[in-house]
Image (tube, grey):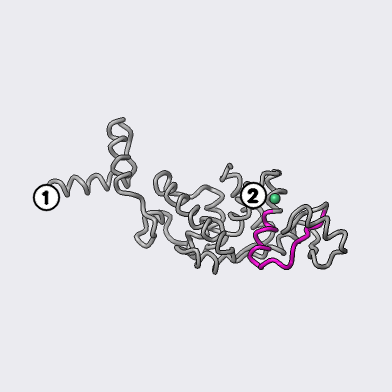
Amino acid sequence: MDFVKLYEIIFKIYTDCGVTAFPIDCFDIVRKRGYQIQKYSELSQKKRKACLCLSPDSCIVKDTLYYQDQNTAERIRFSIMHELGHVFLQTSVEEMADTFSSHILAPRIAIHKSRCHTAQQIHDTFALSYTASNKALQDYKVWYENIAHTTRMPSPPEKQLELLLFSEKCNMPEAEDRFTDDNIVYTPDPIIIYQDIQRALMAGLPLTEEYKRLLKQYRKMRSL
Ligand SMILES: [Zn+2]
């Protein structure tokens, strides 16, 4: 999965559909993308049977999205975004549609900015089921650690998404490195940082400003 591309698509949907807050309005997005919406319970028996045959949760046929309105609200939201995932990613792979759904409902940068550290918080903020919230939390940890160990910056479309949704908090000086903030639960492992520095020194690569600072700190500590 190309996550930069995924977030470019998500950012475009958010801007096209005027999404500015969480939980996102899934039905509004579906409507604004030009689909009619019909509940399974409103269909004729024959049509309902045909839909259920395609999916117990939801399906898109031509220009209409059909959904099982007897499911929980969280499951309905996830399944209709899953259907949009098939459309936007032009894929029939179920896992990819699930990934799309999870990320459009709870962008990892938004989990981060909302300071969600538990599945309960993710459930409350993004209206994901508990199962989906736990998965998103686990995925968020990987996302966070990956960024903390590499660029320390989210990808460009994630950054755009952040500006779109959290603009009042984004007027902070550019230099602020949010990924080394002490308030964040998932901090980079100092051993990994140390190994990174060692590797860079041995390879004769230039150190980042932060690594230079850490190395200075470390040498000072040793000389004490
Ligand atoms: Zn599917």
Q: Mark 1: give few (<14), some (14-19) or many (20+) Cα within 10 Å.
A: few
Secondary structure under the numbered disc 2 in the rendered image: helix
Q: Position of residue 46 (x, y in %)?
A: 88, 59
Label located before the other in sequence (1 or 2): 2
**Residue beneath disc 2:** 9
Q: Residue furthest top?
A: 203
Q: How far apart are marks 1 and 2 (CA)?
A: 53 Å
Q: What residue type is labelled 2?
A: Ile
Q: In this view, does 177 lie to the left or right of 26?
A: left
Q: Is residue 22 visible?
A: no
What residue is rendered at 56% in x and 50% in y?
157
Name the outermost residue toward the left.
Answer: 224
Q: In the image, what residue occupies the spot 76% across and 55% down?
A: 59
**Residues in magenta, as a range:** 63-82
Query: Disc 1 on helix, strand or loop?
Result: loop
| Residue 183 position by quadrant | bottom left
- The label on residue 224 is 1
- Give the x, y percent position of residue 82: 67, 54
Quadrant housing the N terminus: top right
Residue 77: x percent and y percent? 66, 62
Question: How would you rate the neighbour count of disc 2 (Cα within 10 Å): few for under 14, some for 14-19, many for 20 or more?
Answer: some
The amino acid on which the numbered mark 1 sits, given as a three-letter code, is: Leu
**Residue 164: which quarter of the image?**
bottom right
